[in-house]
Image (spheres, helix red, strand yellow):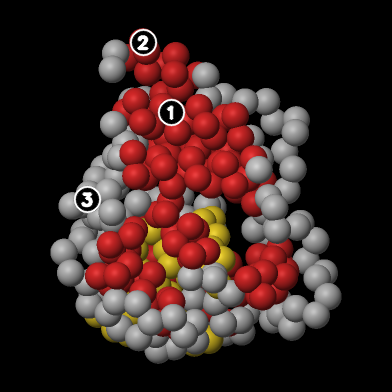
Amino acid sequence: MSGRFAAFAVSALLFAGSWLPAQAGFAADASVAGTDATVQPPPAASLGPLIYIRQTLNNCGPSSVAEVLDYWGIHKSQGEVQSVLRADGNRGGMSPFGIPGYARGLGMSALIGAGGNDTVIKTLVANGFPVIVSQWVSLTDHYGHYRPIEAYDDQKGVFISSDPYLGPNHAIGYSEFDQIWATANQRFYVIYPPARQAQLTALLASTGWDPTSSYLADVAIQQARLNRGVNAPAGWSFRRGYSALSLAWDNLQLGNIAAAQRAVDFAAAQGASPIVTGWITSEIRLRAA
């Protein structure tokens, strides 16, 4: 693809922001009746330990998903999850965009969030929601990695993960956590029972996490990368078409279906897996129906 064509295609993904509805199911008002939500997270909390599943090669994503599903009483091996969420055959790792459809097939719901912060994680963990984050492995290992967070402790200044790669009860200091999380624009994934949607909505609102501004900010980040000819953030290059796919997902959450489809088409032109683009296309069709 020539630089001129790429610049034209990327510019075509820009959109006006005047419409901007709230994401379906995520209201801006935190006062949701009957949610039994702890708004201010306590100094320490744990929902674990989560089951520990040691990953096979580059299988941190399916292992993390399997650990969280087990927490909710759905028992899947990492191989079973891998067969769906790495069906594209990418040897480098898992693309996250199949998680919502996979969760739905198991009777669960899922959120792919961007622009999270420590308070979001603490509040969700304190209220019984495991959170999977996208990060580097560490400050010295700059490879993209998924890990579920099961606990935190303000006195020690650490988050605790049942880390498929680095082991159970893996502690990460807040400072390092924030630095390695920033590499993926603080993306986070929540798999949860649909019956707890109202509680999750209230909890996220209580932290100040706003879906509209968060997805808009990520749109700007992904477009800037594409305008520079960059396919993905550092450490995530194994995700073919990642930036364009993320742009599609963000636009879909914002309700801009046409822009989401243009981004998917651009990702396909970049060589993204048809299985992965198919996941997002399916979500677009569901939203448009």
Q: Earlier in the sequence, mark 3 or mark 2?
A: 2
Q: Residue at x 33, y 67 (%)?
A: 81
Q: Residue at x 52, y 52 (%)?
A: 114
Q: Specify the quadrant that holds the N terminus.
A: top left
Q: Residues within 10 Å of mark 3 (few under 14, many from 20)?
A: few
Position in image of residue 99 (x %, y %) = 44, 59
Residue 109 lies left or right of residue 202; in this view the side is left
Real-space Cα separation, disc 2 to disc 1, in angstroms: 17 Å
Q: Residues within 10 Å of mark 2 (few under 14, many from 20)?
A: few
- Work out whether 60 lies above or below 195: above
Which residue has dot 3 on it?
Answer: 89
Callout 3 secondary element = loop
Residue nearer the viewer, 228 or 6: 6
Question: Which numbered mark, 2 or 1, is in the foreground of this view?
Answer: 1
Callout 2 secondary element = helix
Place residue 257 in its image quadrant. Answer: top right
Query: Is the C-beta separation of discs 2 and 1 under 8 Å?
Result: no
Q: Amino acid at mark 1?
A: Asp
Q: Residue at x 74, y 43 (%)?
A: 21
Query: Is the C-beta separation of discs 3 and 2 under 8 Å?
Result: no
- Work out whether 64 lies above or below 95: below
The disc at residue 215 is none
Furthest-top residue in this view = 4
Which residue has dot 2 on it?
Answer: 4
Which residue has dot 1 on it?
Answer: 265
Q: Amino acid at mark 3?
A: Gly
